[in-house]
Image (cartoon, rainbow, N blue to C red):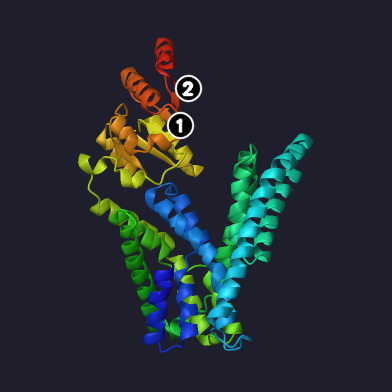
Amino acid sequence: VLATTAAVGMIAHRFAVLPGPAAIVIGSGLALSSTAVVLQVLQERGESTSRHGRATFSVLLFQDLAVVVLLILIPLISPNSSKGGVGFQAIAEAMGMAAVKAIAAITAIIAGGRLLLRPIYKQIAENRNAEIFSANTLLVIFGTSLLTARAGLSMALGAFLAGLLLAETEFSLQVESDIAPYRGLLLGLFFMTVGMSIDPKLLLSNFPAISVILGLLIIGKTMLVTFIGRVFGISTIAAVRVGLLLAPGGEFAFVAFGEAVNQGLLSPQLSSLLFLVVGISMALTPWLAAGGQFLASKFEQHDVRSLLPVESETDDLQDHIIILGFGRVGQIIAQLLSERLIPFVALDVRSDRVAVGRALDLPVYFGDAGSREVLHKVGAERACAAAITLDTPGANYRAVWALSKYFPNVKTFVRAHDVDHGVNLEKAGATAV
């Protein structure tokens, strides 16, 4: 976010001859990406738990926090500021106060939610009233979002915290079912508002300038994110896919540019032009995601050596599920985990199955499930459970024995071929058969 802000701001200041404060606002606004659009694209493509999907989500979450800083900064660098424009002390004081408020608000929400949510939902569930249950869910989501907004944070962060708190309860499945219609409806309303912000006359009259700015934005952000991704150990293809997903602008840019106009930092004409660039770039997100998958299919090697697990690709996994065997049952389990955003990694000794998983950008690797070294490379010591669905009874037994001996903290759930096989698996240390 900081690197993109600096790069875009310098270009706006040097080539567009904009004042420093205006360049900072433009750089910060265009550095942000659309959380709503990108997460929806990742979910529809089943890539939420992939390596590039997890990296993209991490950046989007940080951007939601960075919005707070940007909205605080705009009035301080405004020529109409009562503090006299840019002042390091004024900015530092405002940022410090915002940080304290943010920490206090997030701590209070998490603590209060864990103490109150479960008893409240238990009481409502006993009444067996589906309407009250749904209404309470909406109240929790909107209430948490309003609390974070009052604390100077984004409402998206509040909704995210509410989702985390609700996911910890035993009522999460019913909550997810209840909010599904609202999610589609509100997402459609969001896209309608983005489309309504596009002025066709302005687009036609400034088409060359908009095309140049749009191309520079997407290409520049993709290259920058790819470089940073490689620095942090992400593979080149995964880094490119993260860059393509984060390259378009985001919904918070509309808020930032609108506030900048109110503060006299940007002209209404320039703001309208930037609205067009951001809106069109957001509309291109699904095609950019498809382009990333096309590049992955063309340039990723699918020989056995490239399919082996690499420790650097799984070192960020914690409390994940290990799927041993990526056949029909293993693929069903992987699909279910992906839909629920539960992190997992899969192993199989058939390269064609691994290639199928890789084509979907799933964390599937080639390796022997009974090997201690292979299990270590997929983070078995940090995993919470293993689902063993190998083809033969012997392979299942070896996998259960290896996990129970070398990684006893991992709960093992294994498929048995018959009763005798199930008894042997229990003796080998299986948690459930």
Q: Amino acid at mark 1?
A: Ala
Please name the residue shown 61% across and 83% down the image.
262
Report which residue position mark 1 lands on: 385
Local secondary structure at mark 2: loop
State the image coordinates of residue 419 (x, y, percent, origin top left): 43, 11
Q: Amino acid at mark 2?
A: Thr
Quarter of the N terminus within the rendering: bottom left
Q: Are marks 1 and 2 in contact (CB under 8 Å)?
A: yes
Front residue of 162/326: it is 162
Front residue of 184/400: it is 400
Report which residue position mark 2 lands on: 431
Q: How many numbered discs, if any?
A: 2
Q: Can you tell which quarter of the image residue 214 is in? A: bottom left
Taking 428 as reference, is 3 above or below it?
below
> Can residue 154 be seen from the camera position used here?
no
Taking 92 as reference, is 105 above or below it?
above
Local secondary structure at mark 1: strand
State the image coordinates of residue 311 (x, y, percent, origin top left): 31, 43
Please name the residue shown 41% across and 10% down the image.
420
